[in-house]
Image (tube, rainbow, N blue to C red):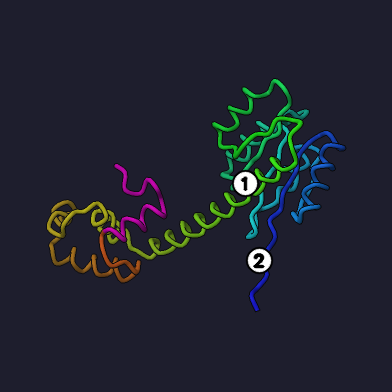
Amino acid sequence: MTPHKPDPVIHVIDDEAPFRRSLIFLLESVGWTACEHESAESFLAAPPSLHAGGGCLVLDIRMPRISGLELQRRLAAIDSPWPIIFMTGHGDVDLAVQAMKDGAVDFLQKPFKDQAFLDTIERAVELSRTRQQASRRRGEARALLTCLSPREMEVARLLALGLSNKEIGRDLAISDNTVHVHRQHVMEKTGTGSAAELARLILRADPAGLDG
């Protein structure tokens, strides 16, 4: 029997109760699991983790005290994985464009069509799952690389940059034979079979891992 995948959760954050509840009703009517928050503060009081099913945040761009944009900034500061959809009133398009530049998935101008809203939710949830998969792969790559000693990591990085054993030996002031031994250990510990695979692993762990 195939295990049931967790359902994604949509969090709607809007200070207008009737509008917020209408969105919750719409989401639940088509099978989404949805939670409502009357303010950014109430969301931040007990911020939920993005679980295995994925999900997204739907934010009003203008709210008292902590605005949607400020909430976006705070979440970005802690590297939050939640995809964000903004809802804007007339005249807020410039703010929404800034939100998009800062990483929002999309913005919807009120009043918007139900189907446009649901389509955007679908897109954001898929993005959350993609981010989770990338995060999982990044974690796995980092775990493999932490098995390397500092010297093996130096050798691994130079191998990934395409240097030969002789060039690595010269750079690190060690013998070719020592480089060969380190190279074998690196390949065994990381499960890689070539410099190209090693480069992919290092870049998966850290996109800047081969810079400088």
In the displayed structure image, the side of residue 189 where residue 55 appears, left or right: right
Q: Secondary structure beneath disc 1?
A: helix
Q: Is residue 78 magenta?
A: no
In the displayed structure image, the side of residue 21 where residue 50 appears, left or right: left
Q: Nearer the viewer, residue 36 or 29?
A: 29
Disc 2 marks which residue?
5
- Tell me which amino acid carries mark 2: Lys
Disc 1 marks which residue?
124
Mark found first going from the N terminus, 2 or 1: 2
The residue at the point 35 percent across, 66 percent down is 190
Q: Is residue 202 above or below residue 113?
A: below
The part of the chain drawn in magenta is: 196-212
The single residue placed furthest to the right in the displayed view is: 18
Label 1 Cα neighbours within 10 Å, binned few <14 / some 14-19 / many ≥20: many
Residue 177 screen position, x and y as percent = 14, 67
The residue at the point 63 percent across, 50 percent down is 125
Residue 135 screen position, x and y as percent = 51, 55
Quadrant position of the N terminus in the picture: bottom right
- Tell me which amino acid carries mark 1: Ala
Residue 72 screen position, x and y as percent = 63, 36
Q: Secondary structure beneath disc 2?
A: loop
